[in-house]
Amino acid sequence: MAVTDAQNPLLGETTCGSLLQKLQEIWDEVGESDEERDKMLLQIEQECLDVYKRKVEQAAKSRAQLLQTLSDAKLELSTLVSALGDKSFVGFPEKASGTIKEQLEAIAPALEKLWKQKEERVREFSDVQSQIQKICGEIAPNISEQNGPPAVDESDLSLKRLDEYQAKLQELQKEKSERLHKVLEFVSTVHDLCAVLGMDFFSTVTEVHPSLDDSTGVQSKSISNDTLLRLAKTVSALNEDKKQRLNKLQELATQLIDLWNLMDTPEEERKLFDHVTCNISASVDEVTVPGALALDLIEQAEVEVERLDQLKSSRMKEIAFKRQVELEEIFARAHIEIDPEAAREKIMALIDSGNVEPAELLADMDNQIAKAKEEALSRKEILDRVEKWMSACEEESWLEDYNRDENRYNSSRGAHLNLKRAEKARIMVNKIPGMVDTLVAKTRAWEEDRGISFTYDGVPLLAMLDEYAMLRQEREEEKRRLRDQKKFNEQQSTEQEAIFGSRPSPARPAGTKKVVGPRANGGANGTPNRRLSLNANQNGSRSVSKDGRRESMRAAAPANYVAISKEDASSHVSGTDPVPASP
């Protein structure tokens, strides 16, 4: 009952005084001595003091921790502001006084804001540095090899530093773009070269780097220094190969054309190799057709050249004789005398002996043909003048026969045409002396320049001209003799008329009908052949000696080189016949 009563006061407010009073009551009831009571009270006081001490220590420790936390917060705040480089940060607490907890509560929002800003800035740095690391690894894989993401230096997260990294990234991205463009150009060049050379592009380009295949995306292609270097070497090697193949193909094309021209290959057969000959004069850059320099095409051309070479050897005699015919035709047109039979025998002997290469023989004959053409060109002017001279002599011969014709003025069919021709012939004949003088001068100049005699079908041209001059002089003397004879006959007729009173018909003088020497090679009307019969056998018997040719020339050369004047025309008709005026 007493315990219950003692506990009742505890149900209300319990204080130290009430507890001490309760303790006195208990002691009184128990009968504790004063010494025990004092001892117990001292013990209670000491225990209370210990509790207070502990609480004070705990409070002091808590205060120190709060102060340290505040100091760390301020330091972290300063560090974050310094790392972020944002000196004008507006989140600093306005109060630097007040209780510790108040100061902590004031600085906490600024710290939280700076922490978030730092995390965002670190992510930005990490992203930029990762991209830089990736591009550097693409450019120089061995040098930039690094495992894991790049470490971010959190001591400097300023925007200035971030801008520097971003500027570096932009430079690297630009370099990457340029390198990628260069790689694509190299790949395109390799593709074009492989197409022209007939090579496998896939195996060629993947040998440089597997990522260069067309199936790989553009951004995935290797842009490393090693790849660019190997691509450049590949392009250089392919260009050199292209150059060598083109030179080889052009040599083969030249040989093909030479062999075709040599053997007169038909156009249909030549067209089969148009793809070879079309690039005979092309430069390396001009050859862009796919397969134009493929190895099988070059081999095909080599086989064709070898086949034509073998065919050329079997047809060597035919080809050489064809060259000889060409050479003989040049000499014939130039009126240069050669011995074709001896030349053909020599060619046969050289081919049969096998001591000379076919190509050397043909080259020598081509050289002879070139020299013959040069010689013919140097003789052309003189030969043209000889042609004109001979044509004039033919007209002179025709005019002489025309003047002897007693019926030339009759109104027969074609008489007016003959009259016109006679007038033109007289004009031409009058030019013969000038032609001869010019021809002599040109011939002598030609001979002095070359130191050899100018021959016309084996006969010296100056000798022909000298003989013409001699015949011309004889012709002049014959004309004078005929005029004197005519005067003498007229004088006798006049005397007889005076004596007998009538004029008998005079007899035709024996030489008046044909006053010139015989023309051995004349036609039915006495007209000489095209060459004035100076070389009657020039187209047939070229083996006739020069002496025989000269005798033939003397016997055949016409004596009527000088035109008959209009006054002498009457000497060729009867003395009793009237002589009409010539046209």
Image (cartoon, rainbow, N blue to C red):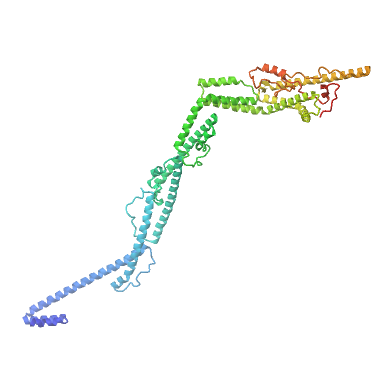
Asked whether, in this view, residue 394 is left or right of residue 134, the answer is: right
Q: Quadrant of the N terminus?
A: bottom left
Asked whether 64 or 126 is in front, the reply is 126
Task: Identify whether 15 is placed above or below 546.
Answer: below
Q: Position of residue 573 (x, y in %)?
A: 82, 22
Asked whether, in this view, residue 538 is left or right of residue 194, the answer is: right
Task: Identify whether 70 is placed above or below 407.
Answer: below
Asked whether 479 or 365 is in front, the reply is 479
Q: Position of residue 78 (x, y in %)?
A: 34, 65
Asked whether 67 or 12 is in front, the reply is 12
Q: Could you say which quadrant of the image residue 157 lies in?
A: bottom left
Asked whether, in this view, residue 563 is left or right of residue 330, the answer is: right
In this rendering, does residue 156 appear at all?
A: no
Residue drawn at 66 percent across, 18 percent down: 546
Outermost residue, left side:
31
Task: Identify whether 32 is placed above or below 153.
Answer: below
Q: How many marks?
A: 0
In this rendering, does residue 289 appear at all?
A: yes
Q: Quadrant of the C terminus?
A: top right
